[in-house]
Image: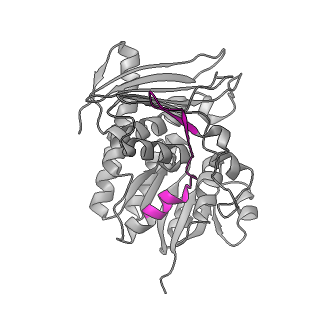
Amino acid sequence: MTRDLRVGVIGFGLAGRFFHSAVIAETPGLELAAVVQRQGNDAAKAYPGVEICRSIEDMLRDTSIRLVVVATPSYAHFDNALQCLRAGRNVMIDKPFTLTSDEARQLIDEARERGVLVTAYQNRRWDGDFVTLKQVLASGELGRIVSYASHFDRFREAPRLDVWRESGVPGGGILFDLGPHLIDEATALFGNPETVWADVRIDREDGVTDDAFDIMLRFDRVTALLRSTLTAAFKGPRFVVHGTKGSFVKWGLDPQEDALKAGAKFSDPGFGEEPEAEWGELHIPGQPVRKVRTAAGDYRGIYANVRDAILGKAALEVTPEQVWRTTRLIELARKSCGEGRRQEFQKN
């Protein structure tokens, strides 16, 4: 009988608790073995049978832990991940992977030298709406895709200056928060872009870090428009895709995040499923508008893939080179905004 792969999670904030520990605990073949929570007892209350460590060093003493998840604030990702890689552990890093592409390359090279895996938690590839979009594109009904728009809109009237992500510390801001998801999805669909244009800004009064961005990625024959803001009282469509034969429009956000925060389990009936009112619409000239049922999302998919990649049973889906590309495109977006012009993307 094969023993479950033991996993340690560093951090038990929003990401560590809901996007990692809760997902790992319900992924077959994985065991949530340890959580690093420097202060407080939330992790111990949530997972009584799991070892609670007060430092990364304490966790790494358990050599049976093969995968470590870095779910600390973004500014600590590089140092935390490097420490774990040097200890010979496979590492999953919550987005953003690192704050610079040079740091990303260092981690990738370190993992290669150690013979271990390193990747980023791009869980939004397992959103039901994105899975459905890929199915629509694969069907060919839209013809050749010419434009792709992706929104991730939220509303928060005033900045939360007491929270690290909006306090002005390195790694904060919405570009580092949601930019990795939107960029990763677009490049997962269309590959390497040729150019990047971006406007990254602060729209709210008293804000100290970016709370809105617009990014245009130009691919060979596709233009991708990526947008996120914290001032959307009325949220835009999640996806709008136009092709030479038709269009696909999808409103609403995948329900998994809210469900996990509310304490739901993946095993609950209907988990990850959207109501029919939020299904996407397929618009083909000469045909009635057709609703497209949204596939049920399941974030366990990314962990199942990492599990199988570590065990040598599958290729890693979120590859190191893709992770580096996303990090580099965030850099180029900031550079584009600062210089007021397009930037060329060159594969390293």
| Identity of the residue drawn at 42% across and 30% down | 246
Relative image position of residue 91 (x, y in whole percent): 44, 58
Taking depth in this image into account, of 110 and 298 the one nearest to the observer is 298
| Identity of the residue drawn at 74% across and 57% down | 42
Relative image position of residue 84 (x, y in whole percent): 44, 59
Relative image position of residue 203 (x, y in whole percent): 59, 16
| Magenta span of residues | 280-306
Decide: is 290 above or below 12.
Answer: above
Residue that sits furthest to the top in the current view: 340
Indicate how the structure is coloured in the image.
one colour
Taking depth in this image into account, of 260 and 149 the one nearest to the observer is 149
Residue 97 in sight from this viewpoint = no
- Please tell me how many numbered marks the rendered image carries: 0
Relative image position of residue 217 (x, y in whole percent): 36, 27
| Identity of the residue drawn at 39% across and 72% down | 311
Report whether 190 appears left or right of 234.
left
- Queried whether the magenta region covers residue 26, the answer comes back as no
Report whether 199 appears left or right of 45.
left
Residue that sits furthest to the bottom in the current view: 1
Which corner quadrant holds the C terminus? Answer: top left
Taking depth in this image into account, of 132 and 80 the one nearest to the observer is 132
- Queried whether the magenta region covers residue 287, the answer comes back as yes
Residue 134 in sight from this viewpoint = yes
Residue that sits furthest to the front in the current view: 286
Q: Quadrant of residue 25?
A: bottom right
Taking depth in this image into account, of 239 and 348 the one nearest to the observer is 239
